[in-house]
Amino acid sequence: MILIPLTPIAAAGLILLAIAALVYALLILPTQWLKLERIRFDAGLGIKALQLSDLHVERLRIAPDKIKRILEREKPDYIFITGDFTKLPEQLPRLGRYLAVLRESAVPVYAVLGNHDYQQPKVRRLIRFIEQYGIRLLRNESVVLPNFQLVGIDDLSSGKSNPALAFSKVLEDKPVIVITHDPNVVLKLRRPFGYLMAGHLHGRQLIVPLFFQFRPMGPLPAMGIFKGLHTTVNGVYYISKGMGQTAFNARFLVRSEVTIHEL
């Protein structure tokens, strides 16, 4: 075997190619490699719910067909969207391609808004757009469903949350499921609930030391709580790692997520 020495230019090219491959594997692939989390919690409801959170469609690398295949395979009873559709009005057509998949599934869909949604210059336009796909937006209100009550608390970090109003029509004789965007609201709740779903924190998005000290996101992440299943005195809550990204369109050691909750 005859080894031909590389020229300096060729060697530099190979080094750059290796760096690019490493960057892709560590930072880009986790935004494309969707993880289906499955949470089983005995809330006594006998339902299966699909949670979608933090779509951020302007920086979303998960195709609508992936969601469609999950819906066809899992056949959930409900779909809950826990905020942050998009902050950019020009992204509504792209958002529509995802919402159309949900509408075609014929599964009941309920949602709340997130802080990035409230950065829209005309929030009412976003609300009308979402609702035209048959999605029920809950803004500090509740609905009674066959065997439980669903409470939607508006976004805490935007100053829109009103838990007292959201719970004002909740009855005592049915279990309560809560959807909200910012999980820090659990520290402000004074009413018991059976189960709560939230997002907002992206599972840190970039697993680096002191992340939430450089980017403060409230008391829960300051305590080391930024994803997964947790318990308070009032109930059990789950924080999704979300589908899309903010700031940098990258994830490090955190994959994009959708979640099946068997309750």
Image (tube, helix red, strand yellow):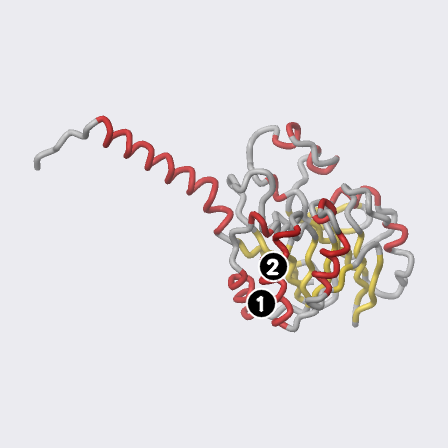
| Residue at disc 1, secondary structure | helix
Q: Is residue 188 left or right of residue 28?
A: right
| Total residue callouts | 2
Asked whether 13 or 156 is in front, the reply is 13
Asked whether 256 or 137 is in front, the reply is 137
* Image quadrant occupied by the C terminus: bottom right
* Image quadrant occupied by the N terminus: top left
* Coordinates of residue 67 in the picture (x, y in percent): 56, 62
Q: Dot 1 corresponds to which residue?
A: 71
Asked whether 43 or 238 is in front, the reply is 238
Please tell me which residue is depicted at 61% across the width and 28% down the height of the picture: 210
Please tell me which residue is depicted at 68% across the width and 57% down the height of the picture: 81
Please tell me which residue is depicted at 84% across the width and 47% down the height of the picture: 189
Q: Is residue 93 above or below residue 227?
A: below
Q: Dot 2 corresponds to which residue?
A: 93
Q: Is residue 222 above or below residue 74?
A: above
Of the residues shown, which amino acid type is indicated by label 1? Answer: Leu
* Res 98 → quadrant: bottom right
* Res 108 → quadrant: bottom right
* Coordinates of residue 174 in the picture (x, y in percent): 84, 65
Q: Is residue 228 left or right of residue 251?
A: right
Please tell me which residue is depicted at 61% across the width and 72% down the height of the picture: 104
* Coordinates of residue 57 in the picture (x, y in percent): 59, 52
Q: Is residue 206 left or right of residue 157?
A: left
| Residue at disc 2, secondary structure | helix
Q: Is residue 181 above or below residue 10?
A: below
Distance of mark 2 from mark 1, alpha carbons?
Answer: 21 Å
Mark 1 Cα shell of 10 Å, populated few (<14), some (14-19), many (≥20): some
Question: Which comes sooner in the sequence, label 2 or label 1?
Answer: 1
C-beta proximity under 8 Å, tags 2 and 1: no
Mark 2 Cα shell of 10 Å, populated few (<14), some (14-19), many (≥20): few
Of the residues shown, which amino acid type is indicated by label 2? Answer: Pro
